[in-house]
Image (spheres, rainbow, N blue to C red):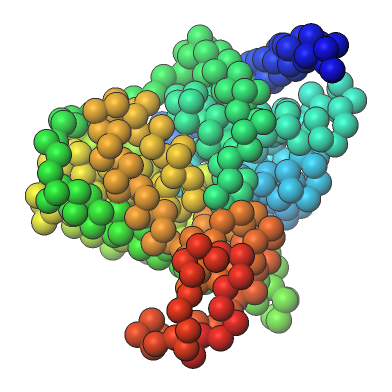
């Protein structure tokens, strides 16, 4: 017992040093690769930005077809928004990542976003980070448990490099893995990887600019109620996005299996639909929409229904097989929704946009802790309490849904909406629910999350 007490701090120190060094090494490599990927992506966007509308009419279906060919014949895991495939790899294959996924995902995302597809840049960055980390695990002959941990470091490093938020990036890389759980053992190595990725990316010239015109809002009961209302609206808008994406995806899968449609045709059809919507509402909701995001965050008017159009653009793009990330679209949806609701709720437009941005992100990704930290890293701590008040109801209102259906369930948000714990969201059976106004036969203990009522009469 005496020897154990003597040696224990030394073993803990060795563990600390091991993961600080290994996480930093992995983060540095991820920072280099992600920086060059983003440089290439932004260059391609700059090239196509001046193209006339008729050229986009060719580029969108053509880019969609090229994306479909790259994914179908190169790496099927590169489909969709990227992070989803990494979450599955962590849970089902101990983090084993096919090395071909990273370059194909990068190319497929460039052909999607440069042509005008509504997707983000962080999904490919997280997938690239995970692939780099998996290669490190191969080189060092890691065990399955060690591989899993280092791949999680790669995910957090990718998020940190792409958003310029090392603390939130590290937490997001852990929080997206499971609904309602933070893997505390992974906080240290993930922080080490995220900080190093951020520093390397910054040293290589990558910069992160978010328009900021937020001002402190004096707290009151009325403000609390208005922020809760914004959080509820944010959660419902994220839920709508998930439902539309699932609808397009299930329709696509049905045509593949029942009618034997050739899979690469769906991204091309997505390009056709996107071009038709371009003709209707313009190009603002397409691509990364960073101009739209910064316009909302600067407190300028973006239109009352731009959030809705962004949802539709994203659902078509990612639901029909084009490639890209999902967090940046959540940013844009949240900022434009918050801007539109700021007036009716009596909030400054810039503040409403910033708070809505974080609330929709928290709901869509089921990552409330990361969203709060990210908001404070981007906009400063003065809005920290406001983020907290809006993020929690948004996280609750999306219910048992996520833009990452492979998230493992560790938490039941409500005993009245039972869900199996310990399995992925996509694998949980859909149990019928009665209308909420029907009285139940017996009272339900709200703390009894593990044993929901068998009868909902």
Residue 351, placed above or below residue 330: above
Q: Position of residue 258 (x, y in %)?
A: 71, 81
In depth, the one of 363 and 257 nearer the eye is 363
Q: Position of residue 205 (x, y in %)?
A: 47, 13
Task: Evaluate whether residue 34 shows in this view.
Answer: no
In depth, the one of 359 and 127 nearer the eye is 359
In depth, the one of 318 and 25 nearer the eye is 25
What residue is at 19 percent from the left and 54 percent from the top? Answer: 225
Residue 239, placed above or below residue 14: below
Quadrant housing the N terminus: top right
What residue is at 62 percent from the left and 57 percent from the top? Answer: 409
Total numbered labels: 0
Can you tell which quarter of the image residue 132 is in? top right
Q: Position of residue 71 (x, y in %)?
A: 69, 51
Can you tell which quarter of the image residue 351 is in? top left
Left or right, 445 with respect to 150, comes to: left
Left or right, 95 with respect to 310, comes to: right
Task: Evaluate whether residue 372 shows in this view.
Answer: yes
What residue is at 69 percent from the left and 58 percent from the top? Answer: 422
What residue is at 36 percent from the left and 55 percent from the top? Answer: 394
Q: Position of residue 189 (x, y in %)?
A: 65, 23
């Amino acid at each position: 017992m005496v020897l154990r007490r003597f040696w224990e701090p030394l073993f803990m120190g060795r563990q600390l040093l091991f993961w600080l060094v290994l996480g930093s090494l992995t983060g540095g490599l991820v920072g280099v690769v992600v920086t060059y990927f983003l440089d290439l992506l932004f260059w391609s966007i700059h090239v196509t930005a001046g193209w006339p509308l008729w050229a986009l009419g060719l580029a969108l279906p053509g880019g969609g077809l090229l994306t479909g060919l790259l994914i179908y014949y190169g790496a099927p895991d590169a489909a969709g928004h990227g992070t989803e495939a990494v979450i599955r790899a962590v849970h089902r294959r101990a983090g084993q990542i096919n090395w071909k996924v990273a370059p194909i995902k990068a190319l497929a995302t460039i052909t999607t976003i440069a042509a005008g597809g509504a997707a983000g840049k962080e999904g490919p960055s997280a997938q690239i980070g995970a692939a780099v980390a998996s290669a490190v695990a191969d080189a060092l002959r890691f065990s399955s448990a060690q591989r899993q941990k280092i791949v999680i470091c790669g995910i957090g490093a990718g998020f940190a490099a792409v958003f310029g938020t090392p603390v939130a990036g590290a937490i997001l890389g852990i929080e997206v893995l499971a609904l309602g759980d933070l893997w505390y053992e992974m906080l240290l190595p993930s922080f080490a990887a995220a900080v190093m990725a951020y520093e390397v990316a910054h040293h290589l010239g990558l910069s992160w600019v978010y328009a900021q015109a937020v001002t402190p809002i004096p707290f009151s009961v009325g403000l609390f109620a208005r922020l809760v209302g914004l959080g509820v609206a944010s959660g419902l808008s994220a839920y709508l996005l998930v439902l539309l994406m699932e609808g397009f995806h299930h329709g696509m899968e049905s045509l593949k299996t029942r009618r034997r449609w050739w899979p690469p045709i769906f991204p091309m059809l997505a390009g056709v639909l996107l071009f038709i919507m371009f003709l209707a509402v313009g190009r603002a909701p397409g691509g990364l929409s960073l101009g739209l995001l910064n316009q909302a965050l600067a407190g300028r008017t973006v239109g009352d229904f731009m959030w809705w159009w962004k949802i539709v653009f994203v659902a078509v793009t990612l639901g029909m097989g084009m490639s890209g990330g999902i967090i940046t679209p959540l940013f844009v949806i949240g900022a434009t929704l918050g801007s539109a609701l700021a007036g009716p709720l009596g909030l400054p437009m810039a503040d409403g946009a910033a708070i809505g941005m974080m609330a929709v992100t928290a709901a869509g990704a089921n990552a409330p802790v990361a969203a709060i930290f990210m908001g404070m890293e981007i906009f400063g701590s003065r809005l920290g309490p406001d983020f907290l008040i809006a993020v929690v109801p948004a996280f609750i209102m999306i219910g048992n849904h996520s833009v990452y259906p492979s998230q493992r369930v560790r938490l039941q948000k409500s005993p009245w909406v039972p869900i199996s714990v310990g399995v992925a969201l996509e694998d949980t059976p859909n149990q019928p629910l009665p209308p909420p106004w029907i009285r139940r036969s017996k009272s339900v203990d709200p703390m009894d999350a593990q044993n929901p009522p068998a009868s909902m009469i």
